[in-house]
Amino acid sequence: MEHHYHQLVTELQLFLPDNRIITDSALCLAYGTDASFYRLLPKMVLRLASTAEVIRVLQLCSQHAIHCTFRAAGTSLSGQAISDSVLITLTDDWRQHEISDQGKKISLQPGVLGADANKYLAPFGRKIGPDPASINSCKIGGIAANNASGMCCGTAQNSYRTLAGMSLVLADGTYLDTRDKLSKAQFAEQQPSLLAGLRQLHEDVINNEALSDRIRHKYRLKNTTGYSLNALLDFADPFDMLTHLMIGSEGTLGFINEISYHTVPDHAFKASCLLVYPDIETTCLAVTELANTSVAAVELMDGRALRSIADHAGMPDFIKTLDLEAAALLIEVHGESETQLQHSCDQAMAVISTFRQLNQVPFTQDKKVCANLWAMRKGMFPAVGAVREIGTTVVIEDVAFHVEHLAAAVRKLTELFERFGYNEAIIFGHALAGNLHFVFTQGFDSQAERDRYGHFMTAVTQLVAVEYQGSLKAEHGTGRNMAPFVELEWGEDGYQLVKRIKALFDPNGILNPGVIVNADPKAHLSHLKPLPAADALVDKCIECGFCEVVCPSKNLSLTPRQRIVLYRELQRRQTNNEVIDDSLQQIFEYQGIDTCAATGLCEQRCPVGINTGDLVRKLRTARYQKFQPIARWSAAHFAGTTKAVAIGLNAANLSRKLLGKKSIASLNKGLRKISHNKVPLWLPELPAANPHRLPDLKKELPKPKSKRSESLQATRNKVVYFPSCASRTLGQSPNAQDSRSLTEVTQAVLEKAGFDVVLPHELTSLCCGMPYQSKGLFDIASSKVQELEARLWQASEQGRWPILMDTSPCAKLSQDSFTLPLTIFEPVTFVLEHALERLTIQPVPETVMLHITCSSQRMGLADKMLHLAQRCATKVVVPEHISCCGFAGDKGFTLPELNASALATLKQQVPNGCTRGISNSRTCELGLSHHSGINYESILYLVDEASR
């Protein structure tokens, strides 16, 4: 780094801890990557925790003339969140919110997820106006800074239109809260030239009739090209102009410290339908008519888009029969009541009744059908990504036309695809706003490919901005991608206005240079991100970052996106025989491989279905090869292995009784230090061995010998119970109110429900294979899976009886791995589908915490688990921002920092008076108990207590 960066680091260290000043080049590469197809490598990455820190950092950057860029979730697509200087990110301390006026207003810090804001507002029947497709992953800071919109919000409910006020920090560190009179008065004294400059801009625009008309015309559409120039027409007060210019400014004018929104209704009654028309002209005529109704959303999909998802599960059969001329509309209608909803549906269908349809899925409120319809629309972007060639990226462009031009524009865009060879390109978008997204794949590894993209974008910008006077960026922000074309869209006088705004707010140009204002006409062709082949398991990754929010290691080491970024770089170096003297390999070993929980939650969020844990397990294979003999021996002698563990548990428990918890903890800490953490962590919550003995049958179960005995058996309710090796080995934790083990409680519940319990023979030798699979020992894991499957096939009489596994991870792995027709249940689904109707439930009068395990989430059981808990307890709390506990089998013992980081916010979320939590994974419950201060146990304990 240059001298002035070293000087900056020295001054930063006076108030920031070292772990929040990242200068290592490998980590800067990981943190510096966003969802766009551009790449810059930051000199440093800062993780800031407070407004005071932001102010001080901006003051220092201003003093040293060092450029800086703000980053929220890094899901933006146009290159506005990358830096080759200082990248400023936020810790999880920026997630506060405040609701006022009965939910009609909400104040949000920039680190709040968009989906969380809506969750907070749901009890009031309200939501925030912006509804970007990335709302489950993107943060409020990014939503506001990009003026992101979405399917329903149009131009009436975006951040600009629903803004109620904000606090912000300018480039020189000046702070302003427009909701506070004193703050405004102080700001007026500190920044008189800025306020005077805004007044002058307002006057200049008002006096330029042609420019005023152009601004009004442009903002009839969605438009995020350049700055929000409509603020200079819509407002005369400089504070109003200032805050509305901050919306959509992409971090080039200042830092949005907090924002207050006027919220919008979130109607309880919703219906969706799918209408297919013979051609794009008819489809767009229907859109024109629907624009005069009260429909909430109209999504347009062209024939290529429909073909891209025709084979996906849940799609209407007729999709496969459509030709490329066909186009479709996906319509959603909202209502305050059933009556209003039905009226809106009837109104919508009436205005388009004269247009010939090819097919339709009529309006329905069926949640499953509606989910499938919207999955079709949301699946189009990843459908293109999934078929792209290795080394290419997925480009999604975002333009807007006036609705009357929509059909002709789609035709001409399609002609451009054909002319430039983008045969895979598809078009879809928010039709009511004339907002089209077109998606195609593009390689940047040759000059010919870069030239093709450059010529294509020149043609597109001429079509959109000149021929149709549309918006070059409707909702994705200008970024670097469209910066060279801002003047083309706004004209010379409009672009001069953009530059004057930038100079007024950031006279030294330190904030996010190159974004929005960029003098390089080829900036959109510079700093293109390489996507080299790395491994087929992750090559489809588009680095969108949707995975990051559920990753348990995100605050400890790396996220799935960051792991893939570093692995790609390692593989690129290896392929090119490059030797670079840096810490990349060493960092990746710990942060990339060791600290990955490999639980697969990232796959659920990934638009192209990547499970980064699969890659990590594959990489662990080589590391654990030297332990193959030991692993094979333990698998072949599994009963003896678990017995040895039980002896160790009892010895540890006896030591605790004799020496006390503090002494044992101190001894364990010393041993871990001497062994460089190779000795597992001892937890006070670690139980003695399970004293409950289950029969370990050594021979096959008897089979019915006569038709009469077979008939008698058929009238009995049987279930095959397979207790996991963890529940067979571990007793109940010492602080639990109920001292019974999980195996005892499970059998008690089954007995109450009237089931005869069947146990597989040679039970103590059986395992689902999870301990071996998680280490990448796939052959050994497979052998244990096959052994277990054979025993369960026999015990269930060839699949006749259901099989209950008492922990969800075992059930999930077995469901994924078994090939025979066996019906596998974990506790929640079994109780709901088979036992609950046989039990009388009286809710336990207490508050319980609920942890929904990764495997339960992956099986789609989150709602069912909450429902069962709510049936059995008067109040159930699901803590925020804890998706995976990070215990990850044995990592809670071997890498306890992962478990600690994942559960860092758990204890503070436990309500006063709450004394227990529930889950359905025995090892997860140990870590949850340790970090919450209350005992976590299987949900079956709660079912047993609430039932009779």
Image (tube, rainbow, N blue to C red):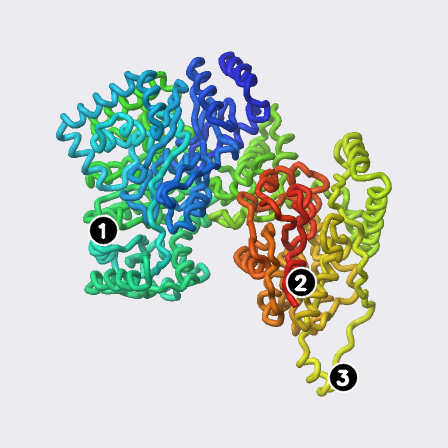
Residue type marked 3: Lys
Q: Front-most of 709 and 383? A: 709
Inter-mark Cα distance, 3 to 2: 36 Å
Inter-mark Cα distance, 2 to 1: 62 Å
Specify which label sits upstream in the sequence, 2 or 1.
1
Inter-mark Cα distance, 1 to 3: 73 Å
Q: Say if 300 sits above or below 576 in the image.
A: below
Specify which label sits upstream in the sequence, 1 or 3.
1
The answer to whether residue 765 is left or right of residue 458 is right
Provide residue 932's location: percent of width, then percent of height. 64, 43
Residue found at x 60% / y 38%: 904
The answer to whether residue 781 is left or right of residue 850 is right
Q: Say if 884 sits above or below 584 in the image.
A: below
Provide residue 367's location: percent of width, then percent of height. 42, 61
- For mark 1, what is the residue? 407
Which numbered marker is on residue 944?
2
Q: Say if 150 sits above or below 69 in the image.
A: below
Residue found at x 72% / y 40%: 894
- For mark 3, what is the residue? 705
Residue found at x 81% / y 57%: 691
Residue type marked 2: Asp
Marks 1 and 3 in Cβ contact (< 8 Å): no
